[in-house]
Image (cartoon, helix red, strand yellow):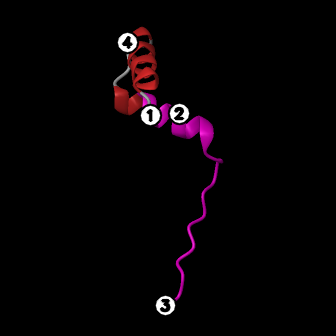
Amino acid sequence: MKPSLAKHARAQAILEDLTLTKLVEKALVDYLPEEIVIKKSEI
């Protein structure tokens, strides 16, 4: 992770009164598709 990205994320979290965990969760919810299907491979 780039230091500048971490600084930006921290600043964004402070502005929105979020914890870093909540910020990451929000980013993942925005980024990932609505439904995720995990397929187990047969060994």
Instruction: Give the residue pinned by disc 4.
Output: 14
> Which quadrant of the view contains residue 25?
top left
Circle 3/circle 4 CB separation < 8 Å: no
**Does the magenta-highlighted stretch encompass residue 24?**
yes
* Residue at image location 42% in from the left, 35% down from the top: 1
How much space separates mark 3 and mark 4, taking CA atoms? 46 Å
Name the kind of residue labelled 4 in the image. Answer: Ile
Furthest-top residue in this view: 15
Q: Point out which mark residue 24 bears.
A: 1
For the residues labelled 2 and 4, the Cα–Cα distance comes to: 15 Å
Mark positioned earlier in the residue sequence (1 or 3)? 1
Q: Position of residue 32 (x, y in %)?
A: 61, 45
Secondary structure at badge 2 equals helix
**SS at mark 4 in the image:** helix
Q: Quadrant of residue 2?
A: top left
The image shows residue 21 at horizontal and vertical percentages of 36, 33
The alpha-carbon separation of the residues under discs 2 and 1 comes to 5 Å
> Can you give x and y, in whole percent of width and height, for residue 33 in the image?
65, 48
User: Residue 12: where, in percent of width, then height?
Assistant: 45, 15
Q: Earlier in the sequence, mark 2 or mark 4?
A: 4
Q: As displayed, is residue 40 above or below residue 5?
A: below
Separation (CA) of disc 4 from disc 1: 13 Å
> Residue under circle 3?
43
Q: Which residues are magenta?
A: 23-43
The amino acid type of the residue labelled 3 equals Ile
On screen, residue 12 versus residue 34, left or right, reads left
The residue that disc 2 covers is 27
Q: Secondary structure at mark 1?
A: helix
Question: Where 3 falls versus 15 (above or below)?
Answer: below
Place residue 13 in its image quadrant.
top left
Residues packed near mark 1 inside 10 Å, few (<14), some (14 to 19) or many (20 plus) = some
